[in-house]
Amino acid sequence: MLSYRHAFHAGNHADVLKHVVLMRILDYLAKKDKPFCCVDTHAGAGVYQLTGEYAQKTREFDTGIGKLWERDDLPDAVQRYVSVVRKINASGALRSYPGSPFFERHALRDRDRLFLFELHSTEIELLRAFTQKDKRIKVVHGDGLGECIGLFPPDERRGLALLDPSYEIKTDYRQVAETLGKLYRRFATGTYALWYPVIERHRVHQLERAVKRGGVRNIHRYELGIRPDAQGHGMTASGVIVVNPPWTLDSEMNNILPYLARTLGEDGQGFYRADVLAGE
């Protein structure tokens, strides 16, 4: 949606979950010498200023990275995530938050490639400035869900696609499932991470059914909630559906999610899910 600005939501509990999962997958891909290709369908600006007007208006980062920033008991994988956020906060104060492209670029090696799609006319200029003509990165001003399909299968035969529309348009739920199905049929061994918000639980159920109807296999779900579902009260939880996850991801997330539910949950109401929606 062209009016959507992620700066209002940067660093919130959903970003914590999405970026922790993203980092675990990228770190796994980077363990092998062979290059990989990463595609981000809704890249955003790259970096967000938490001292800016948008972030300060909602202060959603207080529900996420703000609760982790000064803790000394972080699990190793969460500590790694926070350490990357600290790279753009050299003073030690939490003033900026990296978007997905920052984490993705941080994981790139010389022969890896990254494709960043963004449709918003303001965000795309910020994204171009962020990438600074990095030859490993191609920035595309366009519809990521529609245009990413032609990139698969990638030449590297190893890759990750992050699909995370805003879902402000209700048809996003249908389109993201359709796109995932098309990508899977073109490149069944790729890894796909599909982020979703929990605002109206029935839409999440519809999304899960649509993904499975598309013939996709080896589907795992990782969900984090800070309070119980409550329609009409904003995003209470979010999740990442991962297709063909690294074999290490389940055990890592079963260690990480209980900690995040306790730490980010409101008044002890945090919860999590880590399960398999469809086997191999």
Image (cartoon, rainbow, N blue to C red):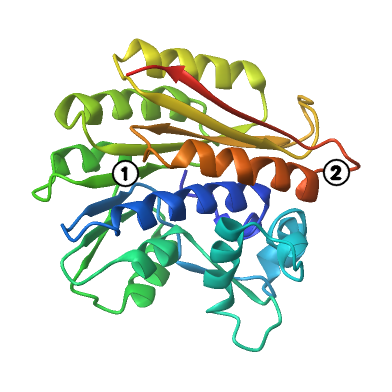
Quadrant in the rendering for residue 32: bottom left
Q: Nearer the viewer, residue 237 or 171?
A: 237
- On the image, the x and y values in percent for residue 190 come to 24, 37
Tell me the SS state at disc 2. Answer: loop
Q: Which mark is residue 161?
A: 1
Q: Residues within 10 Å of mark 1 (few under 14, many from 20)?
A: many
- Residue that numbered label 2 is attached to: 266
**Could you tell me if residue 164 is visible in this image?**
no
Q: In x, y percent, where is residue 218? A: 35, 23
Q: Which residue occupies the foreground of this view, 179 or 279?
A: 279
Left or right relative to 237: residue 222: left
Q: Is residue 112 left or right of residue 178?
A: left
Q: Few, some or many C-alpha atoms within 10 Å of disc 2 (few <14, some 14-19, many ≥20)?
A: some
Mark sitting earlier along the chain (1/2): 1
Identify which residue is drawn at 29% across, 58% down: 31
The image shows residue 81 at horizontal and vertical percentages of: 55, 62
Name the element at disc 1: strand
| Type of amino acid under label 1 | Ala
Q: Is residue 273 visible?
A: yes
Instruction: Identify which amino acid the numbered label 2 is placed on.
Output: Glu
Horizontally, residue 271 falls left or right of residue 143, namely right
Residue sitting at x 49%, y 47%: 21
Of all residues shown, which one is farthest toward the right? 267
Most distant residue in the bottom direction: 91
Quadrant of residue 212 within the rendered picture: top left
Q: Residue at x 51, y 14 (%)?
A: 206
Q: Marks 1/2: CA distance?
A: 31 Å
Residue extending farthest to the left is 155
Q: Quadrant of the rendered structure where residue 86 is?
A: bottom right
